[in-house]
Amino acid sequence: MLRYTIRRLAQLVGVVLVLSMLLFAWLRLLPGGPVSALLGERATPESREALTKQLGLDQPIFVQYFKFLGRAATGDFGVSTGVQPGDSALDIFLQRFPATIELSFFAILIAIAVGVPLGYLAAKRRGGWFDNLSVIGSLIGVAVPVFFLAYLLKDVASSALGLPSQGRQDAIDATRVTGFFTLDGLITGEFDATLNALEHLILPAIALATIPFAVIFRITRAAVLDVLDEDFVRTAESKGLTAPVIRRRHVLRNAMLPVVTTIGLQTGALLSGAVLTEKVFSFAGVGQALAIGFERRDYPVLLLLIIMATIVYVVVNLLVDLSYALIDPRIRTR
Amino acid sequence: MALLEVRDLTVVFQRKGEEPFRAVDGVSFDVEPGQTVGLVGESGCGKSVTSLAIMGLLPKRGTKITGTVSYDGTDLLKLSDREMRDRRGRDLGMVFQDPLSSLNPVVPIGLQVTEVLERHRGMARKEAMIEAKELLDKVGIPDPNRRLKEYPHQLSGGMRQRALIAIALACRPKLLIADEPTTALDVTIQAQILSLMKELVQDLGTALVMITHDLGVVAGLCDEVNVLYGGKVVEKAMRHELFAEPRHPYTHGLLASIPRLDAATHSKLTPIKGSVADNIPWSQGCAFAPRCPNALDVCVRVTPPEEDQLGRLLRCHNPVVPGTPAAEEVRA
């Protein structure tokens, strides 16, 4: 298990190196560039040239890349040119990453907390009205564009429910420790700050949760249907076990493997969803930074954020693969 | 009074938009305490459905069960879900055909034994573990302490079936139902499992309903035998009578289709022609008539009643009579 983990992490280093190279080239292939974004269409050729030189963009691309690698090794990922011009890319990452992690965490939590029980119930009542209704509901969940739902929640639900629909927290006096606003309040004892941050998370997290919810629901339903037909469930019934024991120990535990896989894969989808959701809710996270970064061709910020997102994705899926062994002894003892 | 009295048990599967299907059609039999009764027939004859109906394990939707299944005087078919749940595993135990798929792959063997002890005998986990170890020991699983911690895929097929038997007998039920318990096992293991079951039911005084297509199993184990065809009992006899003089042409055919070691080298095996799918509904005569070598005109017109004939219960217009050439085929 340890060797496996080490091998997977070593692979990750390779993935990051290759990805950084490709991204470096791809970003520079995009039409326009930071210079036009910063100076506008009507800048003089002289000023453009001066800025190009200042940013080091006049050098051959491989020279730029190796300089970047050299600086990155010392923790210097360059300076933002578009998202928050002048700030270091690393600072922007450190500010915004906790926001997106919080948002994604709550979104996936909602998706699991609703999707798994509903999927189980739908399977248990296969063909009944509840099953049909929730299957249709999950189809809508997948089909409705995230930004549409996000606007719906922001413009309609927020006033109806009295929930905030802008930003991560109201302008209250809160101490920053980790950058995770919900945690900071708990650490410093400023519980109202945590509560405020949680309120700000509800609507964007719901918007972001719809697609993973729908996918988790459908996979759970299918997995439970498969397991319910298994002989060992009949054996469990023949022992006269109570319904909760059969559900937990015999049905759900066996149905979890595909569900956990899906949860891992959905973390990737969460990030692309976060771009839209954060934009709609003016939520200062990685997604919003990516959107602005692309508009303004902020090479250093885009590079760092995309690589970090990749690392998160790979690590989450590594954790998923490791959790298989916890769930299924056939993998553990092979 | 018999421990189990099954009377006119009928199971009809009705799916939306489909013809209702009578899987079991008026089956009656008794099981005395400690007795072993066989239900014998080809696949599709209704023997497994009978056992699941007794256990209350058939799906509620689309299934209509009529008749009575009285256990110690209580009609199990009239019990609520909850009451039946209390009895399953405690009063009635069941062993299934495929021991690998019948055990939960992600739960250790130990917990699969103890959970039934905790449920019905009110034991705490620790106490149940000690009892589980004794149970595994009793069913002949070596090194039970280690096996308790292992998972089904780490055990051999025979061990798994032993574990399932231990689970089914954990609460000392008065009735054990075994549905083809040896079919999925190697021949050598089959014999071991059968002798284990024989020994255990004798020791514990458990009555056993043995469901099988294998007349060899019947010969080794059963006191009384019910031969099923098309969801009905066609012949009911004590074991030695049945083997000595099969009366129903179907029973006769089953016995004739067993290869024999003492037969002449080039003698032909006599299979029953056709397949179960050829049968006609019992409402239009004898279901076995299309495959029956003894069939008369009356067989396809009149449904044979169950009656005492030639000293046993039979459902046939033209049974095999001892001394005729057809009968001699089997006896030879």
Image: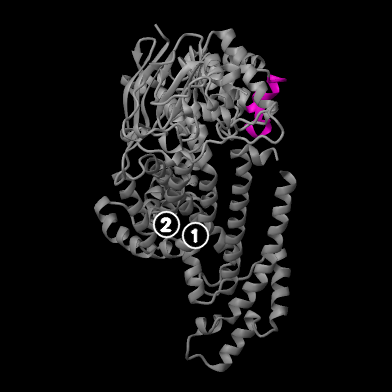
Residue found at the very far front of the displayed protein? B324
Q: Is residue B144 magenta?
A: yes
Rate crowding at label 2 as few (under 14), some (14 to 19) or many (20 or more) other CA atoms within 10 Å.
many
Question: Which residue in the structure is indicated by mark 1?
Answer: A269
- The reply to whether residue B216 is visible in this rendering is yes
Q: Is residue B42 above or below residue A80?
A: above
Taking A20 as reference, is A101 above or below it?
above
Residue B11 among magenta residues: no
The residue at the far left in this view is A160
Mark 1 belongs to chain: A
Q: Where is residue B322 in the image (x, y as percent from the top left)?
A: 51, 19
Q: Which residue is drawn at 34% across and 32% down?
A: B298
| Chain name for mark 2 | A
In the foreground, A220 or A314 = A220
Relative to the observer, which residue lies in front, A300 or B11?
B11
Inspect the image, locate mark 1, and give the three-letter code of the amino acid beneath it. Answer: Ala
Disc marking residue B88: none
Q: At which x and y percent is residue A148?
A: 34, 64
- Residue at the outermost bottom position: A45
Residue B232 position within the rendered picture, expressed as x and y whole percent measured from the top left: 39, 27
* Tag 1–tag 2 contact (CB < 8 Å): yes
* Residue identifier under label 2: A211
Q: What residue is drawn where x is 57% and y is 64%? A: A305
Instruction: State the image quarter where residue B219 is shown.
Output: top right
Q: Is mark 2 on a helix, strand or loop?
A: helix
Magenta segment, which residues?
A: B141-160
Position of residue A92 relative to residue A176, above or below, is below
